[in-house]
Amino acid sequence: MSLIQPARIPFDDPQIVAARTDLVAALRAFLPAESVLEKQEEVRPYECDGLSAYRQLPLLVVLPRTVEEVQRILRLCSERKVPVVARGAGTGLSGGALPLGDGLLLSLARFNRILDLDPVARTARVQPGVRNLAISEAAKPHGLYYAPDPSSQIACTIGGNIAENSGGVHCLKYGLTVHNLLSVTFVTMDGELIELGSEALDSPGFDLLALYIGSEGMLGVTVEVTVKLLPVPERAQALLAAYDDVEKAGQAVGDIIAAGIIPAGLEMMDGPAIQAAEDFVHAGYPTEAAALLICELDGTNQEVSEQVMQVRDLLLESGATEVRTSRDDAERLRFWQGRKSAFPAVGRISPDYYCMDGTIPRRALPEVLRRTAELSKEYGLRVANVFHAGDGNMHPLILFDANEPGELERTEELGGRILELCVEVGGTITGEHGVGIEKINQMCVQFSPEELRQFHAVKEAFDPDGLLNPGKGIPTPRRCSEYRELPTPRAHHAHH
């Protein structure tokens, strides 16, 4: 039995059917027919997000077009005590947009317009359904771009980025979503419209904007966002270094930062990930390497020239067997193409994979890689590692076959142990994917009962009835006590 998946509610349960019929009638009083999806085949595409191991058909799906419609939908659900899950593009990897069988799924897909782009103030005002990459594409003619760049940036939406406080390969130098936003307008569960932050550099009162970003859809439904835009750097150049030992590559990461250099991106892949990416996109990676580092430097011409030489020397001193420097922009993008395609590439070598997300202090990189390899052996499951190495955000990909009885459960257990290892070395259970349902048990390991009580108090202040994305992000005290009473995993759980 899965430790993570909530109990599933049948779509055709008589009570659910009655609730659906009643709610559809109330919604159609103010929404056009095509904005309310109620048939099984219509709601099927919404049954999961990027964490497809867990699925649940929603009670029904609504696709509003205006802020007023969002307000009316939430007021109606609030009055009837119907839970609501907001959804963007569904690319999230922690089950944050997993629907509820007795709840409404609110899709923001139609909120996809860039409302204003001010090249002088370097800001863009956008709706939550705008794709991450679309902002940079719109800003490009003005020599500007939006810095956070998750691997799914071609598809993921800005509303989802806010929910998970997404990062990406450039977050080491330019920060996460929280560092690149000026204001957010959202609707509370009872239909109230609230704006946090402002277009000024600071705004009075508590910094509720930072509290809201990363709140995983549990405090409100985002309807408008103002983001910061940055000038496109004069020059960007990447170095690619191969290592015959994963720990040497981990050490090199610390050496670069210790030298006072903050790269635009500093990424690491291990052997299995290198091989999968090369087979998929043919980026020219050295497939015999045990680890690969990609280091991108950007800034003025002179600054990049000096830092490229410095980093090249550091990489060779740390034991790199080969160091390549991109000769032009096309080659730089090719270096990155393999890394950005690592997740789909791994999907070609295994029937299923489970993408984890934890963050560790950089100094712990070699130890965590070694212990992850030991756990991989113990559970008889292959693990490919991809890292935002510069800020210690790791993405172990556990390869498994869901058709094999018990293998998903074993994968969950291995994933949980890797996350608990992150906490043990002074890290945290997530860097950018959020908690969702996937890591809810590990919240019990990272936080004390007192801390979790404070989280619940914040949730209650925004959503007293607990109707927004319930069951996600913060575990109940009961769940934690049950999880703590489970027997500690040992080798006998492993694959024999």
Image (cartoon, rainbow, N blue to C red):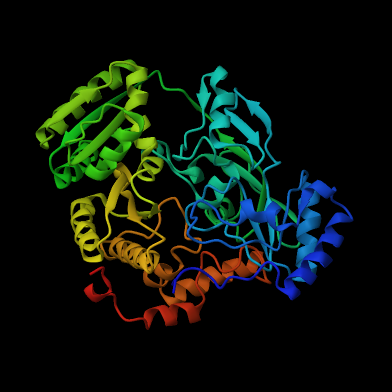
| 414 is higher (above) or lower (below) than 227 | below
Q: Position of residue 53 (x, y in %)?
A: 47, 59
As drawn, is 184 to the left or to the right of 446?
right
Q: Residue at x 41, y 60 (%)?
A: 402
Q: Quadrant of residue 8?
A: bottom right
| 93 is higher (above) or lower (below) than 198 | below
Q: Residue at x 65, y 63 (%)?
A: 468
As drawn, is 342 to the left or to the right of 361?
right
Q: Residue at x 37, y 71 (%)?
A: 445
Q: Is residue 191 visible?
A: no
Q: Residue at x 23, y 21 (%)?
A: 306
Quadrant location of the C terminus?
bottom left
| 256 is higher (above) or lower (below) than 12 | above
* Nearer the observer, 282 or 114: 282
Q: Position of residue 435 (x, y in %)?
A: 47, 60
Quadrant location of the N terminus?
bottom left
Q: Position of residue 200 (x, y in %)?
A: 60, 38
Check the image and name the residue furthest to the right: 29
As drawn, is 344 to the left or to the right of 371?
right
Q: Is residue 410 visible?
A: yes
* Nearer the observer, 293 or 260: 293
* Nearer the observer, 12 or 299: 12
| 451 is higher (above) or lower (below) than 469 | below
Q: Position of residue 371 (x, y in %)?
A: 20, 60
